[in-house]
Amino acid sequence: MDDKAIKQSNFIYWASGIVSICGIIFEVLFGALGSYILGDGVKQYTLTISLFLTGMGIGASISERVMKNLVITFIYIEFGVALIGGFSSFTMFGITAFAPSGTDAFYLYLVTFLVGALTGIELPILIRKANEIGVTLNKSTARVLFSDYAGGLIGGLLFVFLLRPQFGMVKSAFFVGCINLSVALIVLWLFRKEIRRFSLHALIGSVIGILLLAGLFFGEAMAFKFEQKLYKDPIIHMEESKYQKIILTRDGSDVRLYLDGSLQFSSTDEYRYHEVLVHPTMEYASDPENVLILGGGDGIAAKEVLKYESVEEITLVDLDPAVTKLANSNRQLLQLNQGSLTNEKVEIIHRDAFEFLEDSEDWYDVIIVDLPDPNNESLNKLYTKEFYSLIRNHLLPDGAAMIQATSPVFATKVYWTIAETVAATGMATENLHTDVPSFGNWGFVMASRKPIDLSSITISEETRYLTSDMLEGLTEFGRDEDKRIKDKNGNLFSLEVNTLIDPNLIQLYESAWKNY
C-alpha cells in the first residue's frame, strides 16, 4: 500500500473506535434521560439498551445491501447520528414540556432505535472499506472490532465520570454529536478524490456543524426554559451531580427541592413532615445522645434533632456531597435548616447508607431514615428486610427509629409493604401518617426493639404542628388507606416482605404513582 492508503486505513481503525465511543455514550445517555424524565431507572435502561442493540442488529442486516459508495454512505450515516443524537436531549425536554403525555416515551424509544440502527450500519461499512483499500479481511475485521469494543469501554467511563457530571445531558449530546460530525468530515477530506460533489457534501456537513455548535453553546439555556415548564415555580438553582439532578425552585416564600424530578420538601409545610419524622423517636428514646440520620442532606431533620440538649453527636449519612454543599451555601436552605450541618455536633459522611451500616460498629439512641422513595433498584435496597435488619442491629435496646414510607393514600400497597418489611425484622412497629399539603397524606413507620406506647410520649420541644395529644390520632387510618387492601375481585391483597432477592416494591411503587 502507498502512504495515502496507509493513512486512510489507519484512520478507519481510529474512526471505528471513536464512533463506538459515541455510540455507547448515546446509549447510556438515552437510559439516563428515560430514568430522569420517565422514572424507574432499571426499566428505562433495560428498554433503551434492548432497543439500541436491536437497532444495531437491524442496521447490520441492512448494511449487507451497501456494497457501493461505502465512504459517502458512512459519511451520511455519521451526519444522521450527529443530528439525531446531538439534538436528542434538547428535543426530549421540549417534547416533555409541551407534547401530550406519553409522547416523550415514544420519542425517546424511537430515537434510541434509530441511533442504534445507524450505529449498526457503521462497522460493516468500515470493515468493507478497509478490505477494499488492500488490508486482508481477517486483519481488518479484527482491528475494527477491537477498536469498537475498546471504544465501548472508554465511552461508558467518559459518560459516567466526565460528561454527565460536567456537561449535563443536553451539552453532552451536542458535544458527542460534534465528534460524530468531525469523524465524517475527516473521512470526507481523506477520501475527497474519490467522492463526487465534494463541495456539496462539505457544505451539508458545515451546516450540521453550525447547528450542533449553536446547540452546544445555547441549547442548554433553551432546554432550561423547557424544563422550567415541568416545575410549578421558577427554578433558582439547577445542577447535575454525580448521582442525580438537583433542582431548587422558589415562588415568593415557597422554596422547593427536587431530586431527579421528585419533590423533597416545600418550605411552606416541611415542618409538618419533619416534626413527625423526628420528635416521636427523640422523645421516646429519653435523653438521646447519639443520633443517626440516613439521608436528610438538606439539614432540616438535623435542625429538629439539635433542639434536644441531650444530643452529643449526630451522624448524617448522605450519598451526594452536592446536596449537603447546597444546604450549606444556599441562602434559602440555610434559613430553613438554620445552619444545622455546620454545627460541631454534626458529622457528615458521604456514603451509601447500606454500606455505612454494614461497616459501622456504632450504636444509636435514635435512627432517622429520611431517604428518597424506592423508585429504582439502588433506592429499593434501602427499603428491604436486609437494610431494616441493619437498622435494628445498630439501635440501642431503648432506642427508636422512624422511617419515611411514602403515602398510604397514593401508594397504599407500597406503604404497608414497607411496614410489613420493617416488622419482619422482629422490631415492634407503629404506623403513623399526617397531612403535608405539598405532598398529600404521608406515612411513617416507627420501630423499636421494645413495644411502643405512643400515649407515654410527651412532645417537650417547641414545634409548629405536632403536639402530644395528636400522636395517637396519627395512627388512625381511613378505609381507603388501611392495610386491609382488596384486589379487583374483593380479595385481601397479600403483603410480601421486600428483600434484595425479591424486590417487589419497585413494581408496586411504579404502579401506584403512574397516575400522579
Image (cartoon, rainbow, N blue to C red):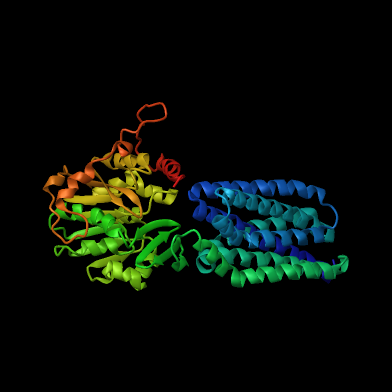
Percent position of residue 404, x then y: 30, 50
Percent position of residue 363, x then y: 21, 55
Q: Residue at x 45, y 65 (%)?
A: 241
Q: How many marks?
A: 0
In the rendered view, tell whether residue 57 sits above or below residue 310: above
Specify whether residue 428 is in view.
no
Looking at this rendering, what residue extends furthest in the front direction? 252
Left or right, 141 with reference to 479: right
Left or right, 313 with reference to 43: left
Find residue 495 and report its image quarter.
Answer: top left
Q: Residue at x 69, y 51 (%)?
A: 117
Find residue 96 and report its image quarter.
Answer: bottom right
Left or right, 470 with reference to 359: left
Percent position of residue 232, x then y: 44, 60
Using the image as rendered, state which of residue 134 and residue 428 is in the foreground. 428
In the rendered view, tell whether residue 114 sits above or below residue 414: below
Using the image as rendered, state which of residue 68 and residue 458 is in the foreground. 458
Specify whether residue 197 is in view.
yes
Quadrant of the drawing holding the N terminus: bottom right
Q: Residue at x 42, y 65 (%)?
A: 249
Using the image as rendered, state which of residue 443 and residue 441 is in the foreground. 441
Percent position of residue 430, x then y: 22, 43
